[in-house]
Image: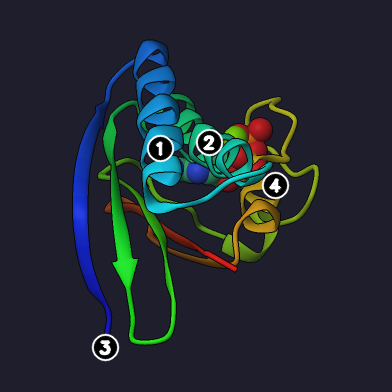
Amino acid sequence: MSTFNEEYSVPINSAADIVVARQKGRALAIQLGFNGSDPTMIAAAISEVARNIVNHAKQGEIVLSGVHESLRHGIQVIARDDGPGIANIERAMQYGFSSNKGMGVGLPGAKWLMDEFDIQSQVGKGTRVSMRKWLS
Ligand SMILES: Nc1ncnc2c1ncn2[C@@H]1O[C@H](COP(=O)(O)OP(=O)(O)O)[C@@H](O)[C@H]1O
Ligand SMILES: [Mg+2]
């Protein structure tokens, strides 16, 4: 069973909000005990999924929380939007694939930076990316 605390929702409507989400994520990671390069990696992953909201869905939110299980603790990042959704998730996850002349490295990069990565999307409904990183 997972419990959550220190929850923050960051509305994402513009490029400036990407910076806010990134900073809040970094601060929460440090507060939860991440150190070394971890806070930077977590902030970079948040940046990519927040940027995808701005670039591909226009608006949405990032929800940051501490996640606690009996044997481990970490950070959870959820990026959700009610945008156009993704028709082919497998293709979207490929390194270098972009539907709009982006670099196409955001989703595979975020997955690589975090320990757990889950993406759910429905065309016409929206997209939800859920990621976790655990303290070692
Ligand atoms: N929140 C989203 N809503 C709709 N489509 C998305 C979303 N996030 C990612 N995508 C789709 O997945 C593709 C790959 O994303 P990503 O790896 O971040 O590359 P990039 O953003 O550079 O295009 C995007 O080009 C887009 O088609
Ligand atoms: Mg991207």
Residue 43 is labelled as 2
Q: Would you say the residues marked 4 and 1 are in contact, meaning their CB atoms lie under 8 Å apart?
A: no
Q: Residue 25: image x %, image y %? A: 40, 37
Q: Amino acid at mark 1?
A: Gly
Q: Are marks 3 and 1 in contact (CB under 8 Å)?
A: no
Placement of 2 over or under 87, stated as above or below = below
Query: Mark 2 vs mark 4: which is more N-terminal?
Result: 2
Looking at the image, residue 91 lies above or below residue 85: below
| Residue 53 place in picture, x, y as percent | 40, 34
Ligand 1 under 8 Å from disc 4 Cβ: yes
Say which residue appears at 63% left-offset and 57% top-offset. 111
**Nearest the camera: 88 or 30?**
30
Q: Which residue is mark 3?
A: 1
Real-space Cα distance between discs 4 and 1?
Answer: 17 Å
Element at badge 3?
loop
In the image, residue 125 sits, relative to residue 44, either above or below, namely below
- Ligand 1, image quadrant it occupies: top right
Q: Residue at x 72, y 38 (%)?
A: 104
